[in-house]
Image (cartoon, coloured by chain):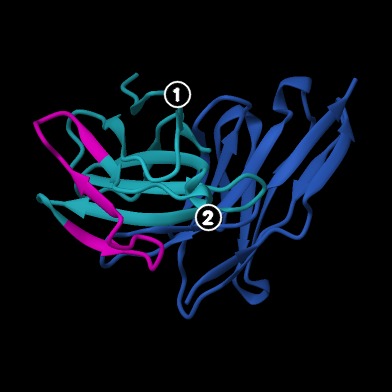
Chain colours: A cyan, B blue
């Protein structure tokens, strides 16, 4: 069964450093998402992406964040200058055209020191 | 803005007992409703979903959920819990339009006693 994959599973970085979280969505899906879950809190929507542009973003997704689909398979989330409060589990999800269900990857745990 | 409430942070049940996890939502129209499960170190796996039609929906692993419009609820049930059901369960609401983002509840951690 096709699945969403994410790398790395765990990333440790120093405050102020740039990080790139990678996702490979399900191959025929056209809608892509990033969510995050701070430890002990709810899963929160960050951004949705379709047709090579952001379709919606939350207030969390400020200028420090960016997303990109650099090739036909990867979908990345970049945090330009990490802060301590960016420490969280980041989930990628994808959805097919004309479908309502998002399929989630296993997540990347980001730890900012 | 839509919101989702899962009033139970932790629930402990004995193996073989029945289970009901509560979910209430706040939204102006009928949303799309989902239950996801997250096992340790795993991603979010879809258990079941409701879009329209029959208000009792069946999902994987023997789970079912009932949409009650009058109570703005979408509670998850299982008649007999297995030890492998121990996990965190998230209720989520979505709607068409825009990016179709999901809004999640805070989750319910299920512990199963043998």
| Chain designation of label 2 | B
| Location of residue A17 (image quadrant) | top left
Spot occupied by residue B56 in the image (x, y as percentages of width and height):
59, 52
Q: Residue at x 57, y 24 (%)?
A: B41
Residues under labels 1 and 2: Cα distance? 24 Å
Secondary structure of residue under mark 1:
loop
- Of the numbered discs in the image, which one, if any, rests on residue B50? none
| Chain designation of label 1 | A
Using the image, determine if residue A109 lies above or below residue B11: above
Spot occupied by residue B60 in the image (x, y as percentages of width and height):
56, 31
Q: Nearer the viewer, residue B53 or A76?
A: A76
Q: Residue at x 42, y 56 (%)?
A: A45
| A76 left or right of B54 in image | left
The residue indicated by pointer 1 is A9
Spot occupied by residue B61 in the image (x, y as percentages of width and height):
61, 28
Q: Residue at x 48, y 80 (%)?
A: B28
Q: Is residue A85 magenta?
A: no
| Location of residue A7 (image quadrant) | top left
Q: Residue at x 29, y 31 (%)?
A: A22
| B107 left or right of B17 in image | left
The stretch in magenta equals A54-76
Spot occupied by residue A39 in the image (x, y as percentages of width and height):
62, 44
Q: Is residue A55 magenta?
A: yes
Secondary structure of residue under mark 2:
strand
| B34 left or right of B8 in image | left
Task: Tell me, yes or no, whether dots 1 and 2 are on the same chain.
Answer: no
Q: Quadrant of the C terminus of chain B?
A: top right
Q: Decide: few, some or many residues near mark 1? Use Cα within 10 Å; few <14, some 14-19, many ≥20.
A: some
Q: Residue furthest bottom?
A: B28
- Mark nearer the viewer, 1 or 2: 1
The residue indicated by pointer 2 is B92
């Amino acid at each position: 069964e096709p699945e969403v994959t994410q790398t790395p599973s765990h990333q440790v970085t120093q405050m102020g450093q740039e990080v790139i979280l990678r996702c490979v969505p399900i191959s025929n899906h056209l809608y892509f998402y990033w969510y995050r879950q701070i430890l002990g809190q709810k899963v929160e929507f960050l951004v949705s992406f379709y047709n090579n542009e952001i379709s919606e973003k939350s207030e969390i997704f400020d200028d420090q964040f960016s997303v990109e689909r650099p090739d036909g398979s990867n979908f990345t989330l970049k945090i330009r200058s990490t802060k301590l409060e960016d420490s969280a589990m980041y989930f990628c999800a994808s959805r097919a055209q004309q479908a309502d269900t998002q399929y989630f990857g296993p997540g990347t745990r980001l730890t900012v020191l | 803005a839509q919101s989702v409430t899962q009033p139970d942070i932790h629930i402990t049940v004995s193996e073989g007992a029945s289970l009901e996890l509560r979910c209430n939502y706040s939204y102006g129209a009928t949303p799309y409703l989902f239950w996801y499960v997250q096992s340790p170190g795993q991603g979010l796996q879809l258990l079941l979903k409701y879009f329209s039609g029959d208000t009792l929906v069946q999902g994987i692993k023997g789970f079912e959920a009932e949409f009650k419009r009058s109570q703005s609820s979408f509670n998850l049930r299982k008649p007999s819990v297995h030890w492998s059901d121990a996990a965190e369960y998230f209720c989520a609401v979505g709607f068409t339009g825009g990016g179709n983002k999901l809004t999640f509840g805070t989750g319910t951690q299920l512990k199963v006693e043998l």
